[in-house]
Every structure is written in C-alpha cells, then in structure tokens.
Amino acid sequence: MSDFIRSEIVGAKIVEWYSCIIARSVDQAIHLQAEIKDMLNKMEESDQILAYYSLVEYRFNMMMDQTTDREAGDEMFNRIDPIVKSSMDNLLHYYYYFISGQHEFLQEHYRSAIKLFRKAERLLEYVKDDAEEAEFHYYMGSSLYRINQYVFASSYLEDAIVTFKRLQYTEKTIFSYNLLAGLFSETDNYEKANDILQENLVSARNYPVAEVIVLRMLGINEYRYKNYSAARGYYEKVLEKMGTETNPLITKTKYNLALTLFKLNEMETAVIFLKEGLQEAKYFNMTEFIANCSILKSLYVDENHYLIDRSLQMLKDHDLHFEIEEMADELAIYFEKQKRTDLSLKYLREAYSSKKNLLKLGVD
C-alpha cells in the first residue's frame, strides 16, 4: 500500500483553504495552511496541485500582509505559467488569471489588472462558489473605480454586496460598501457617501481592519467636502487605532493627514507626518504615495516646481492617471489661490488630459 496522499485530497483541502481566505476566517486559514504544507510533503507528484497551492498561498499572503512582493509574485507566476498553459483544468486557469489580476491591482497597475480580470470573467461559469464569484465582482468593481468607470464599477460592486450580504460575510460587505461610498464621494454626492459610511462604521465595530478603512474613507469624504477639521479627526482616529505597527494603510493615512494639515495651515505638524509618510512609502515601494508626498514637499516645504513635474511624470510612467487627475486638481486649486494663473491653467490641462486617458483605458 502506498504511503502517498492522493493529489485530489490535497486539492480539496486547498479549495477549503481558499474559501476561508475569501471569508477572511484568518485563524482557520492559518491552521489549514500548516495542515496543507504537511500534506504536500506526503502527496503523490502533481505539478497541477502545486500550482494551485502557489496561487492560493499568494492570495493568503495578500490577506495577511495587505500588500504583495512584486518580484516574488512575478517569479511565482512565471514559474507556474507553463503548468497552467498545459493544463485542461478551467478552474486552474480562472485562479491564475484572477489572482494575477489581484497582483497587478495591488501594484497599482489597474489597466493590466482589468485585462486579466476580463480573461478570468470568461471562466466564471466554471466557478461553482457564490463567494468566489462575489470576490471577483468586488475586485473588478474596485479596478473599474480606479479608472473612473463609475457606472460599470457600481454594477459590479452592487452584485458583490448582494452576495456577500446573503452569505453573511460581514467584513466583505463592509469593504464593498466602502468602495461604493467612495464612488459617491468622487461624484460629489458627499451626503450619500456619508450615510453609507456611517452605517458601515456601525457594522465594522467588531472588525478592526474594516473599521480603520471606513474611518479613512470618512476622512477622505470630509476632505473632498472641504470640511478639513472633520477629515483631520477621522485620520487621527485611524492612526490612534493602528498604533505603532507598520502598514501601508498607515502610510496612506499619514499622507492624507499631512495634506489636510497643510490646508489648515498647521505647517509644522503637517511636515512631520509628510516626512514619515514619504519614508514609509519608499519602504513599501508605493509609487503613488512616493509621488504624492514628493509633490506636497515640493509645494509646501521646498517650493520646487521642477520636482512637482518630475513626480507627476513618475505617476504617468506607471499609468496612474486616476492619481494624476486628483493631484493635478489639487495643484490647480493651490496655484489659483496663489494668483499664479499660468500654473493653475497648466495643471487644469494636466487633470483634463489624465481624465481623457482614463476614458481610453476604460475601453481598451
């Protein structure tokens, strides 16, 4: 009698593990990972199951770390690519395209992410799990939101919300509503966004990660409404709740808080948070926030217009047109208040150009 574990048994356990990741059942997911690692050491040879494991392990690390390692991810996808291409397993193909898309999404490559998600969408019929389908809708909606395709984004997000609610995946429902609120905020419907977020905050009371994400979005909504004091309060709550841990969300919030403090003319405190945010953005290799922090530094600290344009070019080089539009709008408003009409018009044109590029990306 063979001592090897059959590959299909390990495969079923990997599917169970993946379901826990989608449900954000963290403790159970950690336990299953350890169990599966032990099973892999005793499993009969199967490159296909190892490919499944590599993909789901990568998705597990995304959940645990809230970020990804670009080089490690690229190496993994390149390694399993020949296995996936030679396989007739449609579900493996789906996982490959979907998780590759998530990898691109977290690297802020939204155009690439959407292309991969579209390939995954053609294989959704082979996914026999409602939670997995809702997870796909959530990520597709998130990506479309980042390129200003609001109508399509809201449709995907609403589909995700319906399913997550039915399955009682509370944290996933909160994340989806949070993005929907962001969409309303982007389109100047601040009251609707606030209503959604306040309800979301109540639902998030027992979910620490979800709670700070909602608090940050409340701050962003108040900032867009030009209620800077309220925005500051929400950002400070995020930092207070997250403490001294190192996390990309803290980095983003420090940038948001610095920008808000500059608006409130609290320059010394703003500079402190800006320096911390820039240092952490470099540590996490967060292109968007390296550029944004550099622009704020150039604007409020160094008055270096050359560095502003260089930072905007950095965003262009990474196809971050959504971020260029937002930052160019900020710059146009700033220079308008400074009575620098030439520079204000320059950055208004930059914002308009980025919006056009976003529309092109949306139909690519």
Image: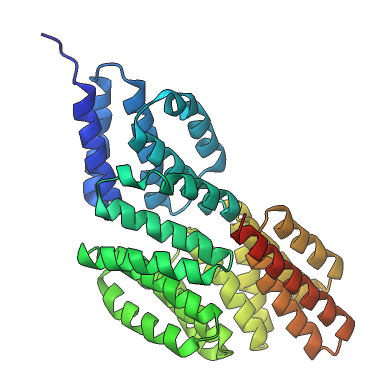
In the picture, measured across the screen, residue 294 lies left or right of residue 225, that is right
Instruction: Identify whether 294 is placed above or below 11.
Output: below
Residue farthest to the right, as pictured: 342
Instruction: Identify whether 264 is placed above or below 200.
Output: below
What residue is drawn where x is 38% and y is 29%?
51
Q: Quadrant of the N terminus?
A: top left
Residue farthest to the left, as pictured: 1
**Can residue 112 be seen here?**
yes
What residue is drawn where x is 60% and y is 70%?
255
Residue 319 spot, x, y in % from top left: 67, 56
Closest to the observer: 170 or 296?
170
Residue 283 spot, x, y in % from top left: 59, 52
The scheme the figure's colours follow is rainbow
In the picture, measured across the screen, residue 286 lies left or right of residue 46, that is right
What residue is drawn where x is 64% and y is 56%?
287
Res. 302 image quadrant: bottom right
Instruction: Identify whether 92 is placed above or below 245.
Output: above
Residue 76 spot, x, y in % from top left: 48, 32
Residue 97 spot, x, y in % from top left: 45, 41
Q: Quadrant of the C terminus?
A: bottom right
